[in-house]
Amino acid sequence: MRGIADYKGIAEQGDLRAIEAMAEKLKGRTMLHVNSTAEGGGVAELLQRIVPLLKDLGLDVRWEVMKGTKPFFEVTKAVHNSLQGKGVHITKEMWDEYEAVNRENAERIRPDADFVVIHDPQPALFIDYKKRGVWLWRCHIDISGPDRVTWYFLKNIVERYDGSIFSVSNFAQSVSIPQFMMQPSIDPLADKNIELSEEEVRRVFERHNVPTDKPILLQVSRFDPFKDPLGVIEAYRLVKKYHDCRLVLAGGTATDDPEGERVLKEVLDKAGADPDIHILLLPPFSDKEVNALQRGSTIVLQKSTREGFGLVVAEALWKKKPVIGGDVGGIPLQIVEGVTGYLVHSVEGAAYRIRQLLMNPDVAKRMGEAAKEHIRKNFLVTRNIRNYLAIWLSMEHRDEKVIYI
């Protein structure tokens, strides 16, 4: 199991020193994280990396996952889409199901710790069962333009927390509790991000029957309408008129996302019989597979139309790949326009930027070099841990004028 010391020489030294100092003040204390899935989503992946490192620092950390019914996850997906502006009507019966499953899980998990972090709307009603400690609601999704009725309901829950955390400043809503900004992060020592040999990369492409004889465009994401895989196929087809290339759409489904199968079917229908479009349905924990696909691609896409943060962008940038992404959510924090990639607003815009990079490989290479350094300075897991510890200390000492760390 990795410890903080393993990141020396990779992460910023200032982050490592701050982590050690703050952890010393919190040693022996208890922390609890609760979310809705153990695999298949960005939140689960973040917790898989963060929790062991927090334990290495001497903290008593628990990570608990909700157990939900199919109707419950249909409700929470509707809430998720509604908070992202889709305007799904949530009925009283749906809210009743939401409350019942939260109650059952809270009774099973017993959320009692010095510092509790509840992730996203699914377990938000755990706040009804607070006994002690500092409780934070961590929002990973874009709620900058929510359906007003849904947000009104959720806001009444969120304001019972001690504080809230958002990934991007414009996601934050007007609430009466303290708000913090914290970007997600990648783990450079995880299987998804470690260096791979050319042979390892080649074997993954061969296993998935993807020839590497042409430039490869890649998007890695869940099959979700907001990731716009259909738009990616349209952009590829515009590019294909001028450049012979391949498109790989690689992803999976999450246990708390009932829409995934429907979107996957739409993608397969749109791809049709095109031999240069490869749809890869990856099982959970395919981290080395994703790593190899990113390293073997020419250009990486993340053409989201709505996005919480889109950490897959940082993963690709870490591998020195230029990324073309939607100008939404946390993607603009990762893509420095014209330096590490390009931000786009349409299918045509994506196709234009793809063509530009295919015609200028030297530019693509320079972008890739700048991309890795940008991620190293700003989006490694050590920065995330530093932020959690700093927020914890600041909340515990919020009535004091000065906090010594």
Image (cartoon, grey):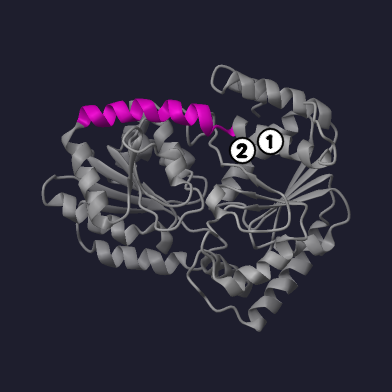
- Give the answer, above or below, for where 300 lies relative to 94: above
Pick the residue in front: 345 or 51: 345
Count of marks overlaid on the render = 2
The quadrant of the rendering that contains the C terminus is top right
Instruction: Compute the Cα span from label 2 to label 1.
Output: 6 Å
Tell me if residue 378 is in the magenta stretch. yes
Amino acid type at image mark 2: Arg
Q: Is residue 124 above or below residue 47?
A: below
In this image, 350 relative to 325: left or right? left
Quarter of the figure with the N terminus: top right
Q: CB atoms at circles 2 and 1 under 8 Å apart?
A: yes
Viewed as shown, does residue 101 lie left or right of 204?
right
Q: Between residue 125 and residue 209, name the one nearer to us.
A: 125
Residue 195 x/y as whole percent:
44, 26
Residue most extreme to the front: 401
Q: Quadrant of residue 5?
A: top right
Q: Label 2 neighbourhood size at 10 Å, few (<14), some (14-19), many (20+)?
A: some
Residue occupied by mark 1: 52
Magenta part, dominant SS = helix
Q: Residue at position x 34%, y 34% from top?
A: 321
Q: Position of residue 74 (x, y in %)?
A: 57, 72
Q: Is residue 142 visible?
A: yes
The quarter of the picture where residue 228 lies is bottom left
Rendered location of residue 173, percent (x, y):
61, 58
Q: Amino acid at mark 1?
A: Pro
The magenta stretch spans residue 16: no
- Stretch in magenta: 361-381
Q: Which residue is mark 2?
A: 49
Residue 75 visible, this angle = no
Q: Secondary structure at mark 1?
A: helix
Residue 368 x %, y %:
34, 29
